[in-house]
Image: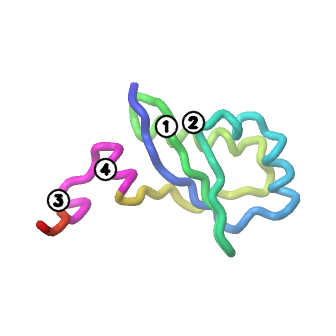
Amino acid sequence: MRDWYFNLVLNAPLTEEQSNTLAHLDRFNDGRIGLAERPGYSRFMCSFEAETLTAAIAEALGFFEDFPGVLVRSVEMDHFDLTTNGMATPAVLPVPPHL
């Protein structure tokens, strides 16, 4: 088992009603998934322990079964996630320039 880091990007920002629902869903309060918002954009930053990245993503997506009206648009990893997940290679992430 290992920890996997990724983001679940929503198709739209959370509504006030969805935000209120989120506050009462215990599964979103265990430290493995956290909401990040900015104007016009909502995503969940995830850290899940699993054998594979696919299994970690599937477990995270399961959190949304009790979250009506929320649609995950994409799963994304930034350069920090790629590095932390051990997936950063010259073909995936450019090598930083020598200083």
Instruction: Report how far apart the C-alphas of labels 4 and 3 lie in the structure.
Output: 11 Å
Question: Which picture quadrant has residue 61?
Answer: top right
SS at badge 3:
loop
The residue indicated by pointer 3 is 90
Instruction: Report how far apart the C-alphas of labels 3 and 2 lie in the structure.
Output: 29 Å
Asked if the residue under mark 2 is in contact with the one under mark 4, i.e. CB atoms within 8 Å, the reply is: no
Image: magenta residue range:
80-94
Residue 53 locus on image (x, y percent): 41, 40
Instruction: Report how far apart the C-alphas of labels 4 and 2 lie in the structure.
Output: 21 Å
Q: Amino acid at mark 3?
A: Pro
Asked if the residue under mark 1 is in contact with the one under mark 2, i.e. CB atoms within 8 Å, the reply is: yes
Q: Nearer the viewer, mark 4 or mark 2?
A: 4
Q: Nearer the viewer, mark 4 or mark 1?
A: 4
Q: How is the image coloured?
A: rainbow
Lower position in the chain sequence, tag 3 or tag 2? 2
Q: If the image is split into quadrants, where does the N terminus sit?
A: top left
Instruction: Give the numbered dot on residue 59.
Output: 2
